[in-house]
Amino acid sequence: MGLELLTSGELAEKLHKSAAALAQWRYKGIGPKFIKLGSGIRYRASDVEAWLDAQTRQQTGEQVSA
């Protein structure tokens, strides 16, 4: 299947953010897509990569497209 799931802690470490920051992103709907499995949260590596691609900019003043 090749499905890689990351925990909040694993993703936070990769992004150099805190798990609390990821929780805020989930609350605000601004982070990568996530999967709620029971009481845990997981992130598909492919969803994280797609989200990172969408964050890529050429200049600092560039607007985010919706």
Image (cartoon, rainbow, N blue to C red):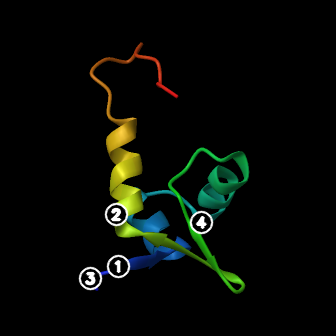
| Secondary structure beneath label 3 | loop
Quadrant of the image containing the N terminus:
bottom left
| Secondary structure beneath label 4 | helix
Front residue of this view, candidates 54 and 17: 54
Q: Which residue is mark 3?
A: 2
Of the numbered discs 1 and 4, the one sitting upstream in the chain is: 1
Q: Residues within 10 Å of mark 3 (few under 14, many from 20)?
A: few
Q: Amino acid at mark 4?
A: Ala
Q: Position of residue 61 (x, y in %)?
A: 42, 13
Of the numbered discs 3 and 4, the one sitting upstream in the chain is: 3
Q: Which residue is mark 1?
A: 4
Q: Which residue is mark 2?
A: 46
Q: Nearer the viewer, mark 1 or mark 4?
A: 1
Front residue of this view, candidates 22 and 39: 39
Q: Nearer the viewer, mark 3 or mark 1?
A: 3
Q: Is 9 positioned to the left or the right of 37 in the image?
A: left
Q: Residue at x 41, y 60 (%)?
A: 47
Between the C-alphas of marks 1 and 4, the distance is 19 Å
Between the C-alphas of marks 4 and 2, the distance is 19 Å
Of the numbered discs 1 and 2, the one sitting upstream in the chain is: 1
Q: State which quadrant residue 37 falls in.
A: bottom right
Of the numbered discs 4 and 2, the one sitting upstream in the chain is: 4
Between the C-alphas of marks 2 and 3, the distance is 10 Å
Q: Are marks 1 and 2 in contact (CB under 8 Å)?
A: yes
Q: Residues within 10 Å of mark 4 (few under 14, many from 20)?
A: some
Q: Amino acid at mark 1?
A: Glu
Q: Position of residue 16 (x, y in %)?
A: 43, 58
Q: Which mark is residue 19?
A: 4
Between the C-alphas of marks 1 and 2, the distance is 8 Å
